[in-house]
Image (cartoon, coloured by chain):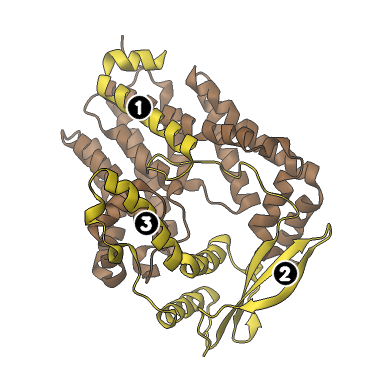
């Protein structure tokens, strides 16, 4: 199928809907800057974060509710603006796409220092807007496939790490991870349904390790995306399953990575030769 | 192959992607600092042992231990991760500042890095009041008294067994 301007618009709308869902979730659960009203931050060994912190905005975020509201507002306004500009085919769309990505880096820098989320969870909000850094179908096509490759590198590197660190070769690795990830649940209430569920996996290392291997294979299989886009719909299914399992078993919210799936969905459209 | 196509059609994007690859390789090889958006994703790559000591924080609200299973995962994380971050922020921020200052100095940026910019001006009383308010929003009732205990546990094939006596954490200032 040929890539048209309508597909670019569909992409922009889908991206905005994902951003809106994410935003509403943060809003409803009182997790925006203006709800948390942070009083401290924790720095990390991150070159970009430390460069951004030269601005001193971290102290403004702790002192001023107006700055926090501004950050919260821009976090949803930028994807909205991006979507509108794309729909109206405005020529400054690439500038706004780039600004959205840069703002999301700044937002992620501070949010990860003042909340419980890690900066890695913001990868999709940083990279996916760059797909819309385009004025033609051709540029969209190349941006989309480059971001798709970036995601494959990220996901595949997690599989390589599991080989290097030896997690895949250790029969008790997943049981140990369950214990570490949920120790506070386990000692808090041994009779709760979820606690019994986790205890089952801790006491049955082979079953737990099977889950680990499934996750590992899921990450490893993404390497196929380096060579062909033929299996992209299967990769979407694997990725969504991975995200759901991470939530159910590990209580880790990787739903904020789902916008990357758009790159695998829209990869089916090709350019005119 | 897509990269070849990219090279001939969008040279800048091609070089940016190669730059991303090189940075990814560098960050994963050095395993020290990251350079957002280039990150290191081990995703529980390995090194955990069933015999590892597990440290658990027990939150006592109005003289009653909080049952974490009654709260969603992010409520648990908000309560425990933020408290843990506060506990080590002073020391950790100093370590990060000293490490990054050394690196930034190599490119002439060390001079503009001021420690006050990278540290918090907060004491335990301010934190406790903020945290109490925070916990109150999550549990949904007034928090009149808040205590925090740290306890180590070891797995004995059946359950987690406490090791030694729980240690009361002094950075939560009990009323």
Mark yes or no: residue A11 visible. Answer: yes
Reading the chain from its start, which is encountered first: label 3 or label 1?
Answer: 1
Q: Relative to B10, is A162 above or below?
A: below
Q: Relative to A9, is B48 above or below?
A: below
Tell me, by letter, which chain the rendering colours yellow.
Answer: B
Mark 3: few/some/many CA within 10 Å (<14, 14-19, 20+): some
Quadrant of the image occupied by residue A14: top left
**Parent chain of label 2:** A
Quadrant of the image occupied by residue A135: top left
Q: How far across and how far down the image is residue B13, in percent? A: 29, 25
Viewer-closest of A71 and A220:
A220
Q: Residue at x 53, y 61 (%)?
A: B74
Q: Quadrant of the C terminus of chain A?
A: top left
Report the mark closest to the observer, 2 or 1: 1
- In what element is the residue under mark 3? helix
Tell me, by letter, which chain the rendering colours brown.
Answer: A
The disc placed on residue A189 is 2
Seen as rendered, the residue at the extreme left is: A91
In the picture of the structure, the residue carrying the numbered disc 1 is B17
Q: Residue at x 45, y 46 (%)?
A: A120
Quadrant of the image occupied by residue B14: top left
Cβ atoms at labels 2 and 3 below 8 Å apart = no
In the picture of the structure, the residue carrying the numbered disc 3 is B98
- In what element is the residue under mark 2? loop
Question: CA–CA distance between discs 2 and 1?
Answer: 48 Å
């Amino acid at each position: 199928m040929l890539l048209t301007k309508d597909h670019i618009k569909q992409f922009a709308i889908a991206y905005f809907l994902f951003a809106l869902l994410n935003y509403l979730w943060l809003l409803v659960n009182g997790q925006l800057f203006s709800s948390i009203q942070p009083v401290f931050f924790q720095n990390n060994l991150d070159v970009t974060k430390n460069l951004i912190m030269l601005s001193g905005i971290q102290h403004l975020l702790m002192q001023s509710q107006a700055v926090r509201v501004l950050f919260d507002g821009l976090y949803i306004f930028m994807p909205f603006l991006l979507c509108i500009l794309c729909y109206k085919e405005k020529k400054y769309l690439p500038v706004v796409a780039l600004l959205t990505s840069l703002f999301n880096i700044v937002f992620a820098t501070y949010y990860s220092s003042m909340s419980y989320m890690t900066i890695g969870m913001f990868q999709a909000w940083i990279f996916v807007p760059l797909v819309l850094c385009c004025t033609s179908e051709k540029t969209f096509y190349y941006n989309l496939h480059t971001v798709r490759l970036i995601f494959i590198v990220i996901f595949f590197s997690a599989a390589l790490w599991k080989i290097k660190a030896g997690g895949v070769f250790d029969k008790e690795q997943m049981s140990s991870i369950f214990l570490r990830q949920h120790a506070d649940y386990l000692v808090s209430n041994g009779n709760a349904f979820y606690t019994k569920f986790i205890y089952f996996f801790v006491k049955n290392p082979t079953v737990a390790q099977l889950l680990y291997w499934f996750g590992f294979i899921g990450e490893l299989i993404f390497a196929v995306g380096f060579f062909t886009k033929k299996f992209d719909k299967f990769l979407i299914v694997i990725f969504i399953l991975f995200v759901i399992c991470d939530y159910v078993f590990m209580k880790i919210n990787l739903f904020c990575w789902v916008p990357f799936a758009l790159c695998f969905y829209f990869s089916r459209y090709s350019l005119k030769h | 192959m897509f990269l070849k196509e990219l090279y001939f059609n969008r040279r800048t994007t091609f070089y940016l992607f190669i730059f991303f690859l090189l940075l990814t390789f560098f960050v994963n090889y050095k395993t020290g600092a990251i350079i957002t958006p280039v990150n290191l994703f081990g995703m529980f790559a390995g090194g955990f042992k069933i015999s590892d000591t597990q440290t658990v924080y027990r939150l006592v609200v109005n003289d009653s231990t909080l049952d974490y299973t009654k709260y969603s995962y992010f409520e648990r994380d908000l309560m425990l991760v933020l408290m843990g971050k506060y506990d080590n922020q002073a020391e950790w921020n100093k370590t990060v500042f000293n490490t990054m200052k050394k690196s930034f100095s190599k490119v002439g940026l060390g001079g503009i890095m001021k420690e006050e910019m990278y540290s918090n001006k907060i004491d335990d009383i301010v934190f406790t009041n903020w945290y109490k308010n925070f916990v109150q929003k999550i549990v949904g009732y007034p928090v009149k008294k808040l205590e925090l205990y740290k306890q180590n546990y070891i797995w004995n094939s059946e359950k987690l067994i406490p090791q030694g006596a729980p240690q009361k954490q002094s950075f939560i200032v009990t009323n």
